[in-house]
Image: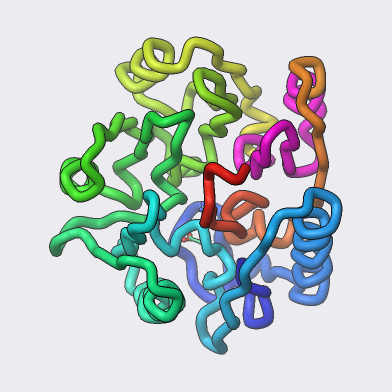
Amino acid sequence: MCRPDHYGIYYEINPWMDRNRQADRTVALRQWEVLYQLLTETLRVQVELLPSVPGLPDLCFTANAGLLVDNLFVSSRFRYREREAEVPHFTQWFLERNYRVACLPEPALFEGEGDALFCGDRLFAGYRFRSELQAHHLLAELVGMPVHSLELADPWFYHLDTCLCPLQPGRAAYYPDAFSPASQRLLKETIPELFPVTEVEARRFACNAIVVGQAVVMNADCPHLARTLAEAGYQVHEVETTEFLKAGGGPKCLALFLDREAT
Ligand code: ARG
């Protein structure tokens, strides 16, 4: 994770962002702090921090750093110039800790865990608004496993982690209309248990949750999904992320998995 010390809405690269609807940084810092404490103290997750950098307001969305597969960190190549300068900070962090670091051959665009999520040992990846289909093929080659490509259909759900939330092998929550019809079929074929999320809750980033074992850390105000998950035996923890929603981010965007097995 990365503390949102320099966070704010300073450019517009997705439909949520509007420079006239500025985020309150003090509130953002408090919301981030609550999430951090919940993860580290209540859920006992070991969280590593990347130092924040002035001029890089979206650096706190570490899910977009890249994707970690075993010990290989596949670094992102961002679609928008506004986020490109984050890349060296992320890669340096992984290099310093002796991870193997790779990036996809140019010009393939790939936005890391924002667009690539494991459900069990199946790797799903989204494309169209940020990552590209071509990048999925290269990613599959690089990590030596198949990638299930999902076409995103609604610009408000521009990253896969805004509309798909893997819960455990064979089970996920998702917002169906964010996917093309063919990709909705693919999801139904590959994930036997799918919990559909309503449009209202999807727009509150219900799917953008952090799953740690049986615990699900999700945005507040999504009572329907919260109830469904509680009934399915999950321990639901709600957090406020109103200030991050203004940039098109929620709890999951603020964290990158370093050790999926441990969760
Ligand atoms: N403002 C950021 C962007 O548009 C938000 C990133 C949200 N991250 C995510 N994993 N969905 O790139």
- Image quarter (top left, top right, bottom left or bottom right) of the C terminus: top right
Magenta stretch: includes residue 201: no
Q: Where is residue 252 in the image (x, y as percent from the top left)?
A: 61, 49
Residue 73 quadrant: bottom left
Q: Is residue 36 above or below residue 202?
A: below
Report the colour scheme.
Answer: rainbow
- Total marks placed: 0
Q: In this view, does 58 lie to the left or right of 205?
A: left
Q: In this view, does 64 lie to the left or right of 138?
A: right
Q: Position of residue 20 (x, y in %)?
A: 63, 69
Q: Is residue 121 above or below residue 101?
A: above
Q: Position of residue 136 (x, y in %)?
A: 23, 43
Q: Which residue is drawn at 76% across and 26% down?
A: 234
Depth check: give the residue in front, 220 or 122: 122
Q: Residue at x 63, y 75 (%)?
A: 7
Q: In this view, does 184 lie to the left or right of 104?
A: right
Residue segment shown in magenta: 204-229
Q: Where is residue 249 in the image (x, y as percent from the top left)?
A: 60, 54
Q: In this view, does 116 lie to the left or right of 207?
A: left
Q: In this view, does 149 lie above or below 253?
A: above
The residue lying furthest to the bottom in this view is 54
Q: Which residue is drawn at 80% across and 52% down?
A: 240
Residue 175 quadrant: top right
Magenta stretch: includes residue 207: yes
Depth check: give the residue in front, 95 or 84: 95
Residue 222 appears in the picture as rendered: yes
Residue 82 appears in the picture as rendered: no
